[in-house]
Image: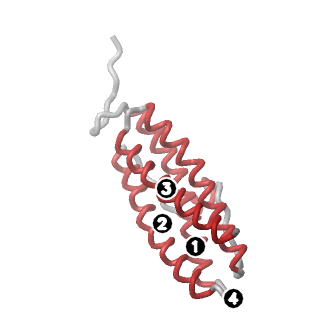
């Protein structure tokens, strides 16, 4: 009879390692999203400056908290979170938004970054569900709910 190697939270070690790897991809993308928001916050110009400057600050503050939660979930699974910019750039599907200053392009970048995050999160939540990893499912479910609402609002602003 085969015995499974179970980690401290009751998840098989190989499964936890695979989940942590997927969460690290999400973490890298979240860090790129966060940095894009900081750049947009600092550099936005035009008639919507006050509105978008404040909105981007709200979004990057929330993203900063989420980065910490994702990294801590990787640690909870018994693995190490990515933590260098080179790792983030290599692992991220989200690319750097550079020198974007106008309102339309800024909001489109945020919306498109969120679409990438949502795609990755749906993959992670499916993987976590298959592993009965309710902690990861709960975290990702909350992220998806928040981001779907933000995408709706950004689309309303764009249209």
Residue 7 placement (x, y as % from top left): 31, 36
Image point (61%, 78%), residue name: 39
Q: Earlier in the sequence, mark 4 or mark 2?
A: 4
Describe residue 123's horizontal placement relative to residue 112 as left or right: left
> Between marks 1 and 3, how big is the CA–CA gap?
20 Å
Q: Earlier in the sequence, mark 1 or mark 3?
A: 1
Vertical position of residue 103 compared to residue 112: above or below = below
Labelled pair 1, 2 in contact (Cβ < 8 Å): yes
Q: Secondary structure at mark 1?
A: helix
Contact (CB < 8 A) between labels 4 and 2? no
Return the residue at label 2: 63
Q: Is residue 112 left or right of residue 148?
A: right
Q: Residue sitting at 43 percent across and 61 percent down? A: 66
Residue indicated by mark 3: 82
How far is the residue under mark 2 from the one under mark 3? 16 Å
Q: Which disc is residue 5 wearing? A: none
Which label is found at residue 37?
A: 1
Mark 4, secondary structure of its residue = loop
Q: Residues within 10 Å of mark 4 (few under 14, many from 20)?
A: few
């Amino acid at each position: 009879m085969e015995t499974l190697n179970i980690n401290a939270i009751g998840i098989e070690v190989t499964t936890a390692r695979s989940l942590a790897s997927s969460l690290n991809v999400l973490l890298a993308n979240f860090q790129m999203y966060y940095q894009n928001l900081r750049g947009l916050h600092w550099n936005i110009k035009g008639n919507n400056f006050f509105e978008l400057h404040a909105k981007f600050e709200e979004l990057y503050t929330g993203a900063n908290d989420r980065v910490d939660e994702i990294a801590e979930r990787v640690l909870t699974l018994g693995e190490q979170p990515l933590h260098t910019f080179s790792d983030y750039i290599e692992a991220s599907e989200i690319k750097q938004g550079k020198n974007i200053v106008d309102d339309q392009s800024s909001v489109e970048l945020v919306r498109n970054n969120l679409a990438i995050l949502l795609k990755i999160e749906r993959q992670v939540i499916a993987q976590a569900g298959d592993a009965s990893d309710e902690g990861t499912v709960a975290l990702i479910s909350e992220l998806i709910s928040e981001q779907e609402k933000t995408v709706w609002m950004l689309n309303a602003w764009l249209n």
